[in-house]
Amino acid sequence: MKVQIKTDTDKCVGCLACMTACIAAHYSFEDEDAESFRSIRRLKDEKAGFQKNICISCTHCGGCINVCKSGAIFRDEETGLVLFDKALCTGCKSCAEVCPVSAISYDKEGKIKKCDGCVDRVRAGKAPACVSVCYMKAISI
Amino acid sequence: MTEIRQTFCSICSSDCPMKCLIEDGRIVGVEPAGGGLCSKGAAALQYVYNKDRIKTALKRVGEKGSGKFEAVSMDEALSITAKRLLELREKYGPESVVFYAGYPKWFRPALLRFSNAFGSPNFCTESSTCFQAYALSWALTFGGKPAGPDLKNCRTLVLWSRNIFHSDIKMGPVLRDLKKRGVKIIDVDPRNTVTAREADIRLDPIPGTDGALALAMGNVIIKEGLYDKAFTEKYVYGFKEYCDYARGFTPEKAQEITGVGAAKIIEAARLYAKNSPSAIMFSASPVVHNINGVQNYRAVEALIAITGNYDIEGGNRVRAAAAAPLNEFGKVIRKKESEAIGQREFPAWFDCSCEEAQCIHLGRQILTGEPYPLKGLFAMGMNHRMWPKPSKLNEALSRLEFYVDTDIFMSESAKYADIILPAQSFFEHDEILPQRGEAVRMRPAIIPPYGDAENDIVIIQRLMKLMGLSDDVLSGSYDEYMEYILSPSGVSLKELRNKPEGVPGKNLIKPVVKSYETKRFSTPSGKVELYSLVLEKYRESQGYEPLPHYTDFREKTARKLGSREKAEEFKKSYPLILNTGSRRPQFFHSRTYRMSWLKNLEEASLVEMHPDDANERGLRDGDRVNISSPVGSIEAFLSVNLSCHPRVVNIYHGNESADANELIPEDYLDPVSGFPGFKSYFCEVRKTDEGSN
């Protein structure tokens, strides 16, 4: 099974709710430096004199799975989400190179860091945190 | 075991329904209980368990402002407070003590009762710089409270300075539904915001020129015979004078003043007048944060009157839906036996009483003792960053003989206090929400208090008891007080406790339409006053104009400089218009800067500028820049933003690291409301010595 987490960039108004919902779902409130797995991008329309922030993240396309030589990235059979095993990650960064939305980064130890689709929530029958807080229904799974 | 409890988030004022996951008396997670949450609500754990939370009562041991305190018991702190406040009353009179309410707003009626029982006329709130000038503009024109847009029935909706996707995201889906229904949207905002992007017509005036824009729209409506003859004849006072005045504001002239194209103005005026019923959604502060703010908003409000869109289905309605009545909110009357702060300078504020003093000059009066000395301050949520030149207010606070602050967080203003009382967050006590719609709602206590933190109203009740002050409804228990608030609705506290998501009122006030047919307008003439008799009364003493007169802030500032050379020099030194405080989605006044997850989302200290202005100055996105005005300078990071109005820069307020209000002079005020011109002052932006980021 494959799933996708999609962000509709027309519907997104850059309210940033998904950004903090993502942090809250993965870190303790005491973790002051915690960062979201989603990121803010600028969308510009030069002609209209308009720009806005949108928030995007890993779509779980799985493009990174094949390039990972150490087998650290895999698709979870139960949920269809693209997950990773930090212990296997060698920090070669080839996954980031092929990511079409630049959604992969690395922690202090140089190991892969990316959206896990709130796998525990999804297993419990809940929507990922970013999907659930989005008033504009711009994020879907 | 995880328990799930529902409440309404109170980090900002949107009251989004929120579910809290609780383990061992601590909130471990939050989820939306309605359509979603915003970035602030989703980070609620960093709010309730913030490192700045005040755990115990504190007594000052160091110099004022040094932040040196020792922990004391609540009993000791309250008894010192009671004793000192009574001493001040004895020595200097009750008016020497100010009772101040910051955010949130739920305890304000009780604090006003405390102030009244003490005998002080000086109940003040942060609304001296937020919302109340809008209410004043409405009261002068229509009498009574602002009438909201009837969204269900309107065909045209004007969003006049309201970027709802960033200030009230809960309303976002509502706006999209209106569009699906075919409602035409006119957006008025200097910036091309995400909200403006969805509008059918976008008007982008230079900040502070709203009055000229609205007068030109009125001009078109009158010239083309699109006004409501029957309504204006019967219910409008000063219609002829208004027409004469608006005649001077042709779309072409307004284009020169506002920068909005004449054709756009005509198109918007026609759409608003013809595609009716039409409603206008106002905003608490953007328009009134100008030195002609009240009159500018009156000019906008005049459009409702001349087109007869007042209190009709689909227009601006006094009450578009049934509502459950409650006691207290907006119903407690301020004691008016002696002169209040601001009363001499801003008399219209007191004529159209909003039941609070105008404390914009609080700091000045503390320092000068004019017109009379202020010696004590009992504050709940004092935040100097709501004032222009905030640092000066803190200086003044240090001169008080006795100052108590009650707060959730150790704020910078709290550091100047003699006693600090720890307040509870909205998760820690029961509170009844102000009247809105058919349902009565409460925020229930869902976790135990943080340390010794106490409910604001219980603090007031305990102090009043210690001081021997009596009040009809505060003398009993807190539960009895809540029962009193609820009583007109017919809903009991017990019923509400079982259903915190809300209970429909048993007694409802019915919606009304065309209320003016049976009840005169609460203005001196009994009509809608485009020509305000209250303002006319102060024409000589204060120089107020009875009509919604347009005074341009640029011209007025230039005139004050005295000579053309000086005006030219000024314009050269400060060529950009400074617009402060337009909402960024992650911030709400000062409070959420202390939540690192929010603070770190983007640069917290950010100044936004149009690419043309940046290029002209050789500035690049991300540069560290200095923003200077005639009265101050701050540093921030530059965000080059296509959505900005050229020649206008935007900075959000309340930021400890770069306080935009430090750039605004203390006396740069609307003479009618006393509101600072936060949305339209002057500045220049340059790269700092350190250069780019």
Image (cartoon, grey):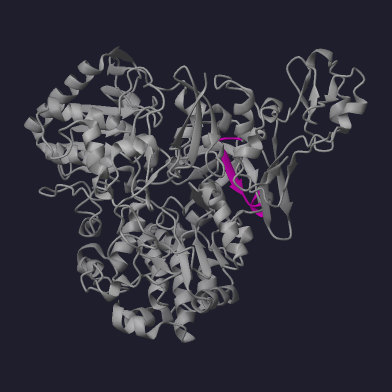
Residue B587 magenta-drawn?
no
Outermost residue toward the left in this view: B90
Q: Look at the picture and state if B629 lies above or below B227.
A: above
Residue drawn at 46 percent across, 52 percent down = B679
Along the line of sight, the residue nearer the viewer: B43 or B161: B43
**Residue B125 x, y percent position in the rendering:** 30, 43
Image point (59%, 27%), residue name: A24
Left or right of B392 on screen, residue A112: right
Lateral position of residue B324 relative to residue B86, left or right: right
Residue at image point 24% right, 29% down:
B458
Q: Is residue A60 above or below residue B567?
A: above
Asked whether residue B402 is in view, the answer is yes
Q: Quadrant of residue A109?
A: top right
Region in magenta:
B603-614
Asked whether B691 or A19 is in front, the reply is A19
> Is B607 covered by the magenta stretch?
yes
* Left or right of residue B451, residue B82 in this image: left
